[in-house]
Image: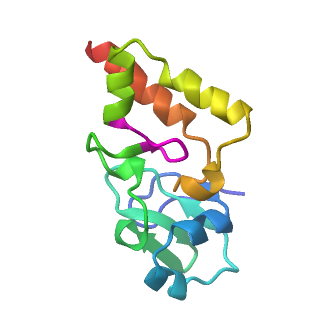
């Protein structure tokens, strides 16, 4: 099967569970949802499409949460389960903390709900580690 690409930016997209899409859409967008389709998540920062299916597109304005990949601001959420933002991750790192290890511990203890809380429908640790690596490189 061919990889799915976003209909707006033509970047590859990954499949996301319907429960994630339902959890993230605003009430108005949810009323337009046709749930029998397979949905995909567009992670491109330069595109305002968040979710799409063959004949459906949901954009940033249709989503209840700010989307990490599409919001470069310091207070944008990175870890949706444990309330880490870009800014709080970097601040913790500069204070000698290891927020990635804290999140990993919470995941091991099965406290996360990434499939419902994170718009990408998957664990945030890759995003967290990227933010921390960028902060280390900038120091």
Name the foreground residue: 87 vs 41: 87
Identify which residue is drawn at 38% across, 57% down: 66
On the image, the x and y values in percent for residue 61 come to 35, 71
Query: Does 98 lie within the magenta span?
Result: no
Judge whether 65 appears above or below 125 on screen: below
Identify which residue is drawn at 58% across, 67% down: 23
Query: Does 84 lie within the magenta span?
Result: yes
Identify which residue is drawn at 41% across, 20% down: 133
On the image, the x and y values in percent for residue 125 come to 56, 33
Judge whether 5 appears above or below 127 on screen: below
Q: What colour scheme has been applied to the protein in the rendered image? A: rainbow
Quadrant in which the N terminus is drawn: bottom right
Quadrant in which the C terminus is drawn: top left
Name the foreground residue: 118 vs 46: 118
User: Please, which residue is most extreme toward the bottom here?
Assistant: 31
The answer to which image quadrant residue 50 occupies is bottom left
Identify which residue is drawn at 41% across, 64% down: 49
Write the start and end of the magenta stretch as one range: 78-86
Judge whether 114 appears above or below 56 on screen: above
Q: Report the number of numbered marks.
A: 0
In the picture, measured across the screen, residue 40 lies left or right of residue 8, that is right
On the image, the x and y values in percent for residue 81 come to 55, 46
On the image, the x and y values in percent for residue 44 come to 40, 50
């Amino acid at each position: 099967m061919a990889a799915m690409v976003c209909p707006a930016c033509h970047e590859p997209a990954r499949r996301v569970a319907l429960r994630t899409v339902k959890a993230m859409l605003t009430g108005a967008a949810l009323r337009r949802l046709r749930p029998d389709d397979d949905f995909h998540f567009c992670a491109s920062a330069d595109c305002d499409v968040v979710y799409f299916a063959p004949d459906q597109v949901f954009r940033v304005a249709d989503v209840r949460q700010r989307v990490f990949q599409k919001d470069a601001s310091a207070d944008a959420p990175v870890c949706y389960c444990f309330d880490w933002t870009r800014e709080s991750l970097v601040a913790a790192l500069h204070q000698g903390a290891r927020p990635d290890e804290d999140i990993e511990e919470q995941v091991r203890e099965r406290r996360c709900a990434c499939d419902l809380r994170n718009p990408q429908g998957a664990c945030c640790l890759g995003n967290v580690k990227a933010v921390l690596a960028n902060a280390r490189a900038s120091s």
